[in-house]
Amino acid sequence: MTHILTVMNWLLPMLYLALLIDYGAAFFLRSPRAGRSLWLPVVVGLHAAFLAALAWRLGRLVPGSSFEVLSVLAASTTLVYWIVELALDRVTATVEELLPEKCDAVVSPA
């Protein structure tokens, strides 16, 4: 269990860095990627597994030290960001469905 926690303790910051690079590249290159990052659910799931394993190893709920509080904060922020992206995908799909009809009404001289 200790080795798994150690590996995940090193792996999670690298996954968050990969997310940062993915979103940064999409933003600065203005790539027309469809939807959200595919790595976001992976990071949320692994971070939740890490927190559960840590709580099981310690025998108590996790937020007991500053390291644990920051880890819970990072996991919850990522979870909220994922939920917002899921909601925005639905809104974006609705806007994209309505947008051509509105543009045709504005452009066509009737």
Image (tube, rainbow, N blue to C red):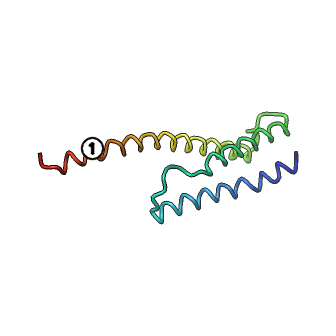
Residue 89 spot, x, y in % from top left: 47, 43
Nearer to me, 73 or 3: 3
Give the left or right position of residue 29, taking residue 110 as reference.
right
Specify few, some or many for label 1: CA neighbours under 10 Å numbering under 14, 14-19, or 20 or more. Answer: few
Residue 22 spot, x, y in % from top left: 57, 59
- Is residue 98 positioned above or below 15 on the image? above
Give the left or right position of residue 93, taking residue 69 as reference.
left
Nearer to me, 98 or 45: 98
Give the left or right position of residue 94, taking residue 20 as reference.
left
Residue positioned most to the left: 110
Classify mark 1: helix, strand or loop: helix
Q: In which quarter of the view is residue 58 placed?
A: top right
The total of numbered circles placed on residues is 1
Query: Quarter of the image containing the N terminus?
Result: top right
Residue 44 spot, x, y in % from top left: 66, 44
Q: Which residue is mark 1?
A: 101
The structure residue drawn at horizontal position 88% and vertical position 48%, both measured from the top left corner, is 2
* Amino acid type for the residue under numbered disc 1: Glu
Nearer to me, 104 or 52: 104
Residue 21 spot, x, y in % from top left: 59, 62
Residue positioned most to the bottom: 29
Query: Quarter of the image containing the C terminus?
Result: top left
The structure residue drawn at horizontal position 41% and vertical position 43%, both measured from the top left corner, is 93
The structure residue drawn at horizontal position 55% and vertical position 44%, both measured from the top left corner, is 81
- Is residue 34 positioned above or below 79 on the image? below
